[in-house]
Image (cartoon, grey):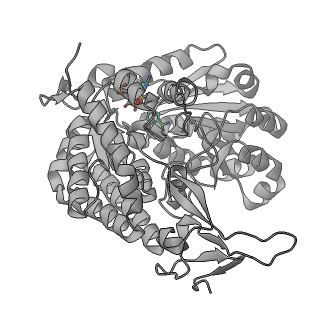
Amino acid sequence: MATHLQSFSTLKGTYIPTTFPIASAEEVEQTVQAAADASIPFSKKTFIERAAFLEAIAEEIMELGDVLLATTHEETALPIARLTGERGRTCTQLKLYANLLRNGSWCDAVIDTAMPNRQPLPRADLRRMLQPIGPVLVFGASNFPYAYSTAGGDTASALAAGCPVIVKAHESHLGTSELVAKAVLRAAEKTGMPNGVFASLVGTGVVLGQQLAADERMQAIGFTGSYKAGMALYSTATQKRKTPIPVYAEMSSINPVILLPEVMAQSAAAIATALAGSISLGVGQFCTSPGLLFALNDQATQSFATELATALANVSPATMLNPQICNTYYADKKALAHTNNVKIILEGSDLSELFQATPALMQTTAVHFMANPSLQKEIFGPCSLLVVCKNLDELKAAISTMEGQLTGSVFGTTEELIAYQYLIDGLQQKVGRLIFNNVPTGVEVCNAIVHGGPFPATTDARTTSVGPEAIRRFARPVCYQDCPQALLPLYLRNHNEAGIVRLVNGIQTMDDVE
Ligand code: NAP
């Protein structure tokens, strides 16, 4: 049995020499117990103290400087410029949660004061707020080595909520994970966080990942990756444990794009250029990559297909994240090309020996799309399927057979967007983010963002994994009845020391309770 893991560099075509020991049973036990032990002391830290911790993590990550960027570049083949941007985004996320904590109102403090004289029965004093759910298990994503990995959105939102975090490091970027994990631990020490508040463990998903998911001390899971692994974790967390726990898994999305006829007649070439950029962005290794395009069977669509294929053919082949992702891309692309009633518009040459992907475009009809669920399988890489529809009714029917998605885009003139609102209503049923006249790649980190969607895009459509709302995934409401002031959490006491907005007897206020 393997005792160490190594990351493979698709840039160099070899394993990177540094080896990372697989966590022993003893180390796993100690880590989980330390996280469980940290739960109460960490939950008692004030929001301001937690905010300082998150800000310190961002500082420590920036302190890692070029060493971090170079390590990740070698491990993932992602260009330095992209990694620099992603590092900035990761620090922005950490600071966003720090700001949320400093503001304090996220905890939904509600106070209903006692009514001792109420008839026929008196009312008790009832106070409620969100409290941390407990230790959270995070699976980093291969395609976002910073923003969705060791100190990424799941970790940042769980720590902000007051939950200790254990990360299962992704095998694709073990060196990156180690550097970032050490940065988090330094930040924890500098800001006086309890031991066990954070840990990163090395091991395989099927052994370590499953063991951690099954451990009764873990209270929630954050995951980004494949449908297969996400569902394996979901099954363990909800069916194989004595106590089921929430799983926030972001899995598979092909991000449909609807191309309405008027806008296609006016701007097919410009839309093709924009979509070629989006399909090939990051070598198609984005969860928001547009893998499905719906258009009517007309002249504009024909010239659009030619323009898009030409633009994609002009994209230089680029190196993928790891050999498995590359091999899966070519296998899935081949399977699609050989599917009955699928026409190849652009297949691209096979550069899998160099771990490089070439973009592809295939075409089918709405009738065949609706009849064959395999055409909805996510192909992780720069490949898209154009679904040609006889008319808008058929387009609507095709949308209604679609699985849940992270995003849905509609290109149309203002007039046709209004005229065909029923198509957009149908699309809204399926997606977490509706986009008008733009491509789906690019996820803004801001208050209004939703990065989530109906199954199988995620396992819980009620949440987002990006933006301040993500903190709620790792918190639960607790109500205190007739609790003495001294025992109440700071945020529910009569004196509003933290100065947060609270709902007191049905009125939003920052005032003290009389
Ligand atoms: P993955 O294979 O799902 O792996 C993600 C994490 O889950 C890894 O840490 C992995 O550990 C672990 N894991 C795998 N099988 C598991 C199991 N049965 N139980 C518990 N944990 C398990 O994803 P990936 O390596 O990032 O990429 C593979 C494929 O996932 C891609 O080709 C793509 O299709 C999809 N993907 C989708 C998105 C998206 O956002 N939609 C993002 C990334 C990837 P090991 O490394 O030890 O297996």
Q: Residue at position x 40%, y 68% from top?
A: 46
Q: Quadrant of the N terminus?
A: top left
**Residue at 70% of width from left, 53% of height from top?**
412
Residue 358 appears in which quarter of the rendering? Answer: top left
Seen at 46% across and 38% down, the residue is 223
Left or right position of 469 against 326: right
From the viewer's perspective, tell me whether residue 174 is left or right of residue 100: left
Quarter of the picture containing the C terminus is bottom right
* Residue 495 higher or lower than 212, as above or below: below
Query: Horizontal and vertical percent for residue 425?
Result: 78, 49
In the depicted structure, whether residue 62 falls above or below residue 330: below
In terms of image quarters, where does ligand 1 lie? top left
Instruction: State the count of labels.
Output: 0
Q: Is residue 501 above or below residue 277?
A: below
Q: Is residue 61 rendered to the left or right of residue 131?
A: left
Residue 186: quadrant of the picture: bottom left
Q: Quadrant for residue 307, please give it.
A: top right
Q: Is residue 386 visible?
A: yes
- Percent from the top left, x then y, of residue 242? 54, 28
Along the viewing direction, whichever of 312 and 73 lies nearer the viewer: 73
Residue placed at 54% from the left, 18% from the top?
Answer: 337
Q: In this view of the protein, which residue sits in the foreground, 233 or 291?
A: 233
Instruction: Give the left or right position of residue 120, taking residue 78 as reference.
Output: right
Name the outermost residue toward the left.
17
> Which residue is nearer to you in this view: 41 or 467?
41
Say if 436 sits above or below 388 in the image: below
Residue 9, how many percent across, how many down?
22, 30
Residue 206: x %, y % from top left: 39, 21
Report if residue 9 is visible in the image. no
